[in-house]
Amino acid sequence: MSRPELLSPAGSPEALEAAVAHGADAVYLGWGSFHARTRARGFTEDQVQDSIAWCHVRGVRVYVTLNTLLTDRELPLALQQARAACRFGADAVLVQDWGLFALLRAALPDFPVHASTQMGLMTSGGARILHADGCARIVAARECSREDLASLCQNGGAEIEAFVHGALCVCVSGQCAMSALIGGRSANRGRCAQPCRMEYGAGCHALSLKELNLARHIPELSAMGISCLKIEGRLRKPAYAAAVTSVYARLVRENRGPTPEEEAVLDAAFSRGGSTDGYFTNTPGPGMLGFGPASPDTPEPLPQAPDAYAVPVVFTGTIAAGVPSTLTVRDRQGRSVTVSGPVPETARSRPTEGSEVAERLGKTGGTPYRCETAEVTVEPGLRLPARAVNALRREALDALSRERAAVPRRREGRVPDLPELDCSAPVPAWTATVSRFDQLSGLLADFPAVRIGVPLEELHRPLPDRETEWCAILPRAWRDRDEEDLGQMLDRAKSLGVTGVLCGNIGHLSLAAGRGLRLYGDFGLNVMNSWSVEYLRRKGLDSVCLSFELRMAQIRDLQKILPCEAVVYGRLPLMVTENRPLCTGSLLRDRTGAEFPLLDAYGGRTEIENSRPLWLADRSDWRGAGLSFGRLRFTTETPEECRQVCLAYLNGETAPGAFTRGLYDRGVE
């Protein structure tokens, strides 16, 4: 069984060097505006190119992060950046955006792509879909348990990467809109303001999780077939990368759990009230919550042997009369270079011995290499000066470095054109979704909703008799172990008259496959650009609900390759959490007094709603943006309130109380 790769964060060139020096097998880094830690110092383009070569010489892989959502205007620049990373020899690119993923598979078919945890891949069905489309590795959602990860490894097709250490998000991966909706800084675009670390109620940090620490589970993770163990922390200091990497490198190499000394180093590296493995052990709850300042002093990394992570090489050479001396150096990957030096002289006194040459070749200090063996054949009676042997060693290692840093040959294709399809509509039709079955009685009988969505778990009684298409809203968070139950619920819903499903995760396509249901993309898919629409069209969707982080002008300009929908009324969802936040009752209250309702979600989870509903009834701009559908999203409303909202939207009325325009005007960073 091969051991998993250890992947460390590189938020700066200094952090990169610290991680490599302390045993990282790979590092991940970003530059520019399209990576999920834009507050990290990051790299310049020249530094990225130099760092990739430097790492490859040392046998360390480099993954470039382009893992944010992108607008149509940003896609060409992101693709240009991916081309640069490919030409520099990066080992893979990490992405979240469906549109960029589709473009990369067409324009850079040989460049490995890894699916970011922000894609929210938590089931084998979703992993298989991405793998079939050319995704080499899936970074599993951080809330996956040991059973979930084992199932992904066994059934997902692609390599599986799992986070083992660092900061944890309380929200299901890729589904946090709290920072965007409250402060205009999008977590999906690398600018999270961390509202989850704030107080909600006096002294209650109901959303702040402790640091992830899976150090004691390393043997289990290795045994289940995890390909890569990932340390979070690109916003942290180089000393953090050194300290945490030094511990995990030992544990992975020796396939064991940590000693008390090693645990102390991890605990001291950074802390928010301790560490947790609650997601992995499937025990979410109050024990995962923690808050506090970072440790004031990051500990020193555990001591390493000077050449602990140097590249092992083998030297062989020949020193023969009348011909140039030669030296060959080989690494364990099969690379081999041969260099030649001066013709040896006839010895006047003490001839050169093979053991003497081997000893000099072993002096690789100050280089990335460690001499395993050196065998040099020296004919008797010859003399080769020490300086000539040293020069041969330097020249051979320099040549090997060039070989190890050589950029692989990869194909580059042209950027394909989007299909000439126009599904824009002159006037959008109405759709609606409810969170509770009883709210259906409040929808006006003459409210012309062409589609009404009901949570799948609410569909266990006859549906009202009205002219509309009934759809099941699939849960945004579920696991492989839930699929049998969900499949039975879908079959029951179909027997009640449901003909479509709202898909908020790519894994829903696998869940709904073969059931004869129409597929509609929900807002959980985070669609922000025309290429994402095209990718989902190819997956068989009949429409898509666009991200509510888009400005209305961006929605207007987006190419409507499929019929497009936007939420135009309702409390927008801020988070989906694995369990109900503590010490908060039925709502969260922040320091400004704003109250955020908590709704039950499938599997004992909780959806946190915005404090004010989105209200666009009195606005006309969204009606002329080419949308096919405008959705009324009912969450906390009584049936009577649902009826009043329907009337207000039919009549274009102003809001009856406090409301928000969402992000359609101001957009997000």
Image: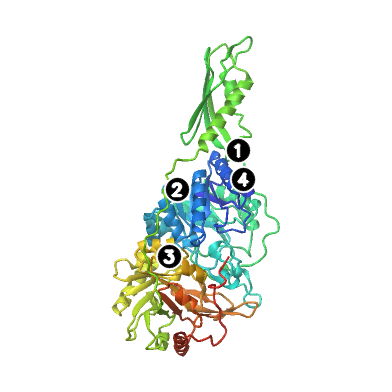
Give the number of the mark in front: 4 or 2: 2
Q: Amino acid at mark 2?
A: Phe
Q: Residues within 10 Å of mark 3 (few under 14, many from 20)?
A: many
Q: Which mark is residue 559?
A: 3
Name the spot of residue 75 as percent of width and height, x first. 49, 58
Q: Quadrant of the C terminus?
A: bottom right
The span from disc 2 to disc 3 (Cα, nearest Å) is: 27 Å
Image coordinates of residue 472 in percent, x first then y, are: 37, 75
SS of the residue under disc 1: loop
**Colour setup of the view:** rainbow
Q: Name the one closer to the observer, 70 or 393.
A: 70
Nearer the observer, disc 3 or disc 4?
3
Task: Note whether residue 96 is visible.
Answer: yes
Tell me how far mark 4 sits from mark 1, CA to CA.
14 Å
- What residue is pinned by disc 4? 17
Label 3 to label 4: alpha-carbon separation: 44 Å
Residue 220 visible in the shown view: no
In the rendering, which numbered label is found on residue 582?
none
Mark 4 lies on a secondary structure that is helix
Residue at mark 1:
307
Q: How far is disc 4 from disc 2 in space, using C-alphas?
A: 24 Å
**Mark earlier in primary sequence (1, 3):** 1
The spot of residue 117 in percent (x, y) is 49, 60
Mark 4 or 1, nearer chain start: 4
2 or 3: tag closer to the N-terminus: 2
The three-letter amino acid code for the residue at tag 1 is Asp
Q: Secondary structure at mark 2?
A: loop
Q: Give the residue displayed 43% in from the left and 85% down from the top.
A: 439
Residue 111's disc number = 2
The amino acid sitting under disc 4 is: Glu
Q: Which label sits in the foreground, 4 or 1?
A: 4
